[in-house]
Image (cartoon, helix red, strand yellow):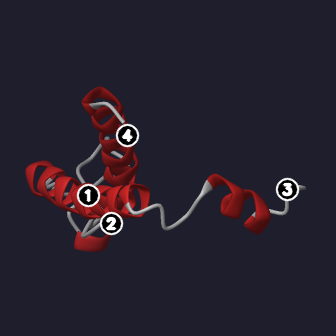
């Protein structure tokens, strides 16, 4: 596998991880009791975006490392995946 392929896979994992991490610790204006007039009560009070980007990078790196170990050591092959998913062999 080339370095560009590995970076592309890491980017996809990072992007999916971002959507997993975004809801962590979100408090809406309604929950905090500080609804600003003219805004949606479900809007977040503080996003803590930098902290979420750091956590996204940590989560994505752990997932990528696990995937890379499975790939390098061939712990799961394409034939095994096809069998597990019920495709005819």
> Which of the two marks, 2 or 3, is nearer to us in this view?
3
Mark number, residue 87 = 3
Question: Which corner quadrant holds the C terminus?
Answer: bottom right
Q: Secondary structure at mark 1?
A: loop
| Disc nearer the start of the sequence (4/2) | 4
**Distance Cα–Cα, label 2 vs label 3:** 49 Å
Circles 1 and 2 in contact, beta carbons < 8 Å: yes
Mark number, residue 61 = none
Question: Residue 81 sits in which quadrant?
Answer: bottom right
Q: Residue at x 31, y 50 (%)?
A: 18
Q: Residue at x 30, y 72 (%)?
A: 31
Task: Please name whichever residue, 17 or 64, is drawn nearer the observer in this view of the structure.
Answer: 64
| Disc nearer the start of the sequence (1/2) | 2
**Distance Cα–Cα, label 4 vs label 2:** 38 Å
Q: Residue 6 at what x, y percent from top left?
A: 31, 38
Q: Residue at x 23, y 71 (%)?
A: 32
Is 54 above or below relative to 26? above
Mark number, residue 35 = 1
Question: Residue 25 sits in which quadrant?
Answer: bottom left
| Disc nearer the start of the sequence (2/3) | 2
Q: Judge the density around disc 3: few (<14), some (14-19), many (≥20) Cα neighbours within 10 Å.
A: few
Pointer 4: what residue? Answer: 9
Pointer 2: what residue? Answer: 30
Outermost residue toward the front in this view: 73
Q: Secondary structure at mark 4?
A: helix
């Amino acid at each position: 596998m080339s370095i560009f392929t590995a970076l592309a896979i890491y980017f996809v994992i990072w992007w999916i991880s971002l959507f997993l991490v975004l809801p962590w610790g979100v408090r809406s204006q309604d929950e905090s009791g500080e609804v600003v007039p003219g805004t949606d009560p479900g809007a977040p009070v503080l996003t803590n975006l930098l902290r979420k980007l750091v956590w996204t990078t940590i989560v994505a790196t752990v997932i990528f490392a696990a995937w890379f170990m499975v790939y390098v050591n061939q712990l799961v092959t394409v034939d095994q995946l096809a069998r597990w998913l019920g495709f005819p062999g």
